[in-house]
Image (cartoon, coloured by chain):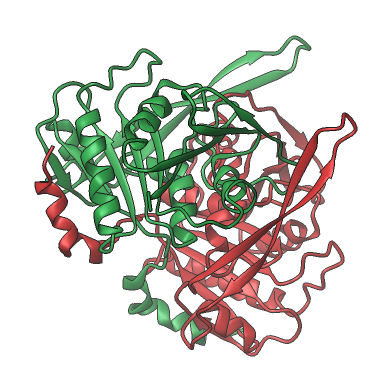
Chain colours: A red, B green
Amino acid sequence: MKPLILVTNDDGIVSPGIKHLVYAARSFGEVVVVAPDSPQSAKGHSISIYDPIHIRKVDVFDGVESFECSGTPVDCVKIARKIVLKDRVPDICLSGINHGLNSAINIIYSGTMSAAMEAAMEGIPSIGFSLDDFSFKADFSSCMPFVESIIKYGLDTGLEHGKLLNVNFPKGKIKGIKLCRQAEARWVEDFKINEDPRGRKYYWLTGHFQSGDEVEGTDVHALQNGFASVVPAQYDLTDYKALDSGLRMIEKIEI
Amino acid sequence: MKPLILVTNDDGIVSPGIKHLVYAARSFGEVVVVAPDSPQSAKGHSISIYDPIHIRKVDVFDGVESFECSGTPVDCVKIARKIVLKDRVPDICLSGINHGLNSAINIIYSGTMSAAMEAAMEGIPSIGFSLDDFSFKADFSSCMPFVESIIKYGLDTGLEHGKLLNVNFPKGKIKGIKLCRQAEARWVEDFKINEDPRGRKYYWLTGHFQSGDEVEGTDVHALQNGFASVVPAQYDLTDYKALDSGLRMIEKIEI
């Protein structure tokens, strides 16, 4: 039987990145797409609990079964599982290809990676792909052979050694793949300040990425040196080092 | 000099949980509140990149400097740092007290914990508090002595052993504090299906929490046994076990 492949993203169903991913995936199995009907970048692991969600069957991928969804990327995975696939379990979930890197701490803000993580939390091997190019005119030609090989690897192995992969590609020629840890980094936030049409001051978030951890072994280092980075990720956020530290005395504090 | 304490939450600035937290915090230092102007539960690490944010000074905590913000919980932390505090660095960030538990994997969906994590990513010791009671009439009397002691502990130690704590309280009498790891668990999603006023079918996310990991040492186990759970959390999502596994062969796959 052909593998069942769920595809989603956060840039929205009409973005070139998801089209490249769908067309790569369909040579490996039955593809079902459930993706946001609008850009949902930086939505993290947000889910819609206050609002209803709409889905609509669309024909944007040359016959591939596809639905646009009014919710977040994580909503897309949930509604794909329960409503669209009626509890059929995908063999793999692919998310992206994101326009812009999700390396380092960007994994935490990323709707693309949060969707992949949601699928992983439901036991589905999942891979998020991102390319270092925000443009809708991004050139995916260098990364597509890697995307295809990694999809094949994921299906062949069931990702038995790491159920959730964060894959990032540099712009241009790619020298190979490096298995990496997530680089420590931060965003230095800033806000554009202006007045809205009713005279109220508004703040519009911007900022720049600051990496202080570009050593070998990190995803940032691999990307800077022309390699695709693969970070195996997980959703157990426990800081195990802290568990075995002086923090233990918090159990004894005076109430 | 008095410590500077930033307080936020995800239930919104008028929720009883944040009021209890603000009133507990103000005996320890200078409190500044920046919290959402509407409920923002389950917004995860979402940030507003497509929309401007408004903030407004409000007087809801008996003279404590407070701002409501139209953004997400993580937006609140970012705008607090840059605009409200003008880069003064808080000694601690407190988030909550959430109406409803953020134990186990709920940390990932939680706006309360994502706000605390954002502050931790900026180097600020941070604690998120949650109580097992969704009601606005929740009784905080049992947990408040623990909240106060944990704030004091956080300020005294600077959380040197674990910069981000996920603290959850059971309903009713609390036997003590347990330092825990995050329990494995999942949400079994479901959707309420109905028709909107324009005749379109809509789906409204619901579901139930399914814990398959209630063994001693987990936060779920501690809470079930009447203890407050403290999970030290971190934002490096690397699955280090997978780094040293057969996954390494992904570097060698044929392109």
Who's the residue at 47% across and 46% down the image?
B114
Who's the residue at 28% across and 17% down the image?
B139
> Seen in the image, is B37 located left or right of residue B227?
right
Number of marks drawn: 0
- Front position in the image: A42 or A61: A42
Who's the residue at 77% across and 58% down the image?
A19
Q: Give x and y (percent) for residue A202.
A: 77, 40
Compared with residue B54, is residue A93 higher up or lower down, i.e. above or below? below
- Front position in the image: B227 or B122: B122
Who's the residue at 20% across and 60% down the image?
A243
Camera sees residue A124: no
- Front position in the image: A19 or B222: B222
Toward the front, the furthest residue is: B1
Compared with residue A246, is residue B196 higher up or lower down, i.e. above or below? above
Q: Give x and y (percent) for residue B31.
A: 44, 40
Compared with residue A238, is residue A84 higher up or lower down, i.e. above or below? above
